Amino acid sequence: MQIKQSYISEITNSVKENYHRIINSLPVSSRKTQMPAFQITYFLSQAISNDMKVAIFFNNDDSNGIIGKIKQLDDDRYLISSPAGNLFKIFYNDEVHSIQKVK
């Protein structure tokens, strides 16, 4: 009986180790998926009309994005400025990868 339990325990440990090795070898991406264009336009308009603070992630940038409030400059050109006012960026809506509301 003792031999069967130790054998089962060895198999269990082996399966756990293999599982963790496989999971740890998978690529991890913190990047969210690309939002559709209509959704970006809608979120931008909602952020402007409700004066919301948002985080915007851009297609050509792998950083954490820019957090701030948005103002519309033209039909498809926008300005995001940080709450402290020391960081700003002018962008077009087709440069946006995703938008996220910030509390």
Image: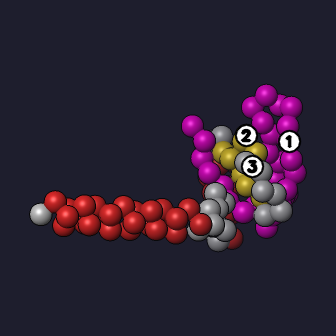
Q: Are marks 2 and 1 in contact (CB under 8 Å)?
A: yes
What is the C-alpha distance between the residues marked 2 and 1? 8 Å
Q: Which residue is mark 2?
A: 68
Q: Nearest the camera: 4 or 14?
A: 4
Residue at point 78%, 64% (across, down): 59
Which label sits in the foreground, 3 or 1?
A: 3
Q: Nearer the viewer, residue 35 or 29?
A: 29
Q: Is residue 98 left or right of residue 12?
A: right
Which residue of the protein is positioned furthest toward the front in this rendering? 3
| Kind of residue sitting beneath label 3 | Gly
Give the labeled residue for mark 3: 65
Confirm whether residue 49 shows in the render. no
- Magenta-drawn stretch contains 88: yes
Furthest residue toward left: 1
Image: 33 above or below 87: below
Q: For residue 25, which quarter of the picture?
A: bottom right
Labels 2 and 1: the sequence-earlier one: 2
Q: Is residue 53 above or below residue 73?
A: above
- What SS does tag 3 mark? loop
Determine which quarter of the picture holds residue 87: top right
The amino acid type found where label 2 is placed reads Gly
Q: Is residue 6 above or below residue 51?
A: below
Which residues are drawn in magenta?
Answer: 74-103
For disc 1, the marked residue is 88
Whole-percent x, y for residue 24 in the image: 56, 62
Q: Is residue 40 magenta?
A: no
- Mark 1, other Cα within 10 Å: few <14 / some 14–19 / many ≥20: some
Q: Residue at x 25, y 66 (%)?
A: 8
Instruction: Describe the element under mark 1 as helix, strand or loop.
Output: strand
2 or 3: mark nearer the eye: 3
Tell me: 33 left or right of 17: right
